[in-house]
Amino acid sequence: MIMTRLASILFFAILAVGFLGQADVAVAKEKAADNYSLYCVQCHGSKGTGRGINAPALSVQPRNHTSAKDMSSLTDESVFKSIKEGGVAVGKSTQMPPWGGILTDEEVTDLVKHLRGMCKCEGKK
Amino acid sequence: MTRILALAVSALMAVAAPSAMAADGKALVESNKCGSCHKMVGPSAQTIAEVMKRKAPDLFYAGSKFNKDWLVKYIQSPTTLRAGGVVYLNSISLNGEADVVKDPPKCASKLSAGDAAAVADYLMTLKDASMKTGVFKPGKVKKARARVVMMKDEACNACHVFPGKGGGISCPTFEGIGERLNPDWMYSFIQDPKHWDPKVWMAKRDFDDATLQLMVNFLMTAD
């Protein structure tokens, strides 16, 4: 009895150490505004108008996220899809990268809400 | 059990006993305060808040990442590799509606040739043991095919400068990258950038081995 308990404690201790030793530990969820700054501003710009430092090198202008006209023509589902799977998944430019490997679905959903705040508009129904 | 212990101890000793040059290098890294800007011990920044405090690229896996000959040269007279700064967000300001880069930070290393050789020896001992080596297969470089993949299908040039072709500036240039980096590390980084930097502002894509080999072969000759 004691032996099995000891063995199971040892087992979990080894498991815990194994996890801590992993380089790819799950990282805490970030705020949408912070994710936007780090991942999106490089192209969409700190004002969100599509004038980031990479924009001069692009052949397609990054979407102006503050434009109610442009952003209200997109459904929330398609905005989610373009962020997660990239522009190509919604028939747009490959210069809009797929962020699914970096951001969680929850973080992408938060970003969609954040974009709706930026354009002060609702998604196409 | 004792045999396993003995093995583990001798493995540890081997890691802990670097060459005399590397030991000098370690002392030089300390006396030159490289660690005041660079992380010499892992892990990499785990949150965006930590990324924002990054002053210089991580060096705690330098031995996996760099070619030694390049290191020896660079730490004697560093050049700009990241035109948009280390963390571009810390180097941009607004010019009207558009962001522009202002004074990206530079490396302060100015070692003599002798010191640089010792420091490079030490840096080459800082390895990530989990990285697979011998992965890169040098082959015929299919430049045209690689350009279609990298400049059209995946738009790597949206963020990286391609030699002679231009590109984005929010991350390191591809100019001279073949001389600078270990191809096995490039392969590993493109396959899973988050393994090296959990908050890296580069997308992670699912590439097969053939595509990774194509891209790394192209980068190895990009000068």
Image (cartoon, grey):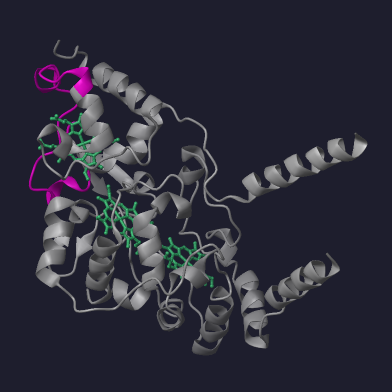
Q: Position of residue B128 (x, y in %)?
A: 54, 64
What is the magenta segment's predominant secondary structure? loop
B19 lies left or right of B195: right
A69 drawn magenta: yes
Please name the residue shown 28% across and 57% down the image: B208
User: Where residue A125 sits: x, y (%)?
Assistant: 15, 10
Query: Foreground residue, A44 or B197?
Result: B197
Q: Is residue A46 visible?
A: no
Q: Residue at x 28, y 62 (%)?
A: B212
Q: Is residue B205 left or right of residue B121?
A: left
Which is nearer the eye, A74 or B131? B131
Region rendered in magenta:
A48-77
- Tag count: 0
Q: In this rendering, is residue B93 above or below B149?
A: above
Up-down relation of residue B175 to residue A56 (above or below): below
* Residue drawn where x is 41% and y is 67% of the image: B185
Q: Quadrant of residue B179?
A: bottom left
Residue B118, quarter of the rendered image: bottom right
Quarter the N terminus of chain B occupies: bottom right
Judged from this view, the residue extending furthest toward the front is A1
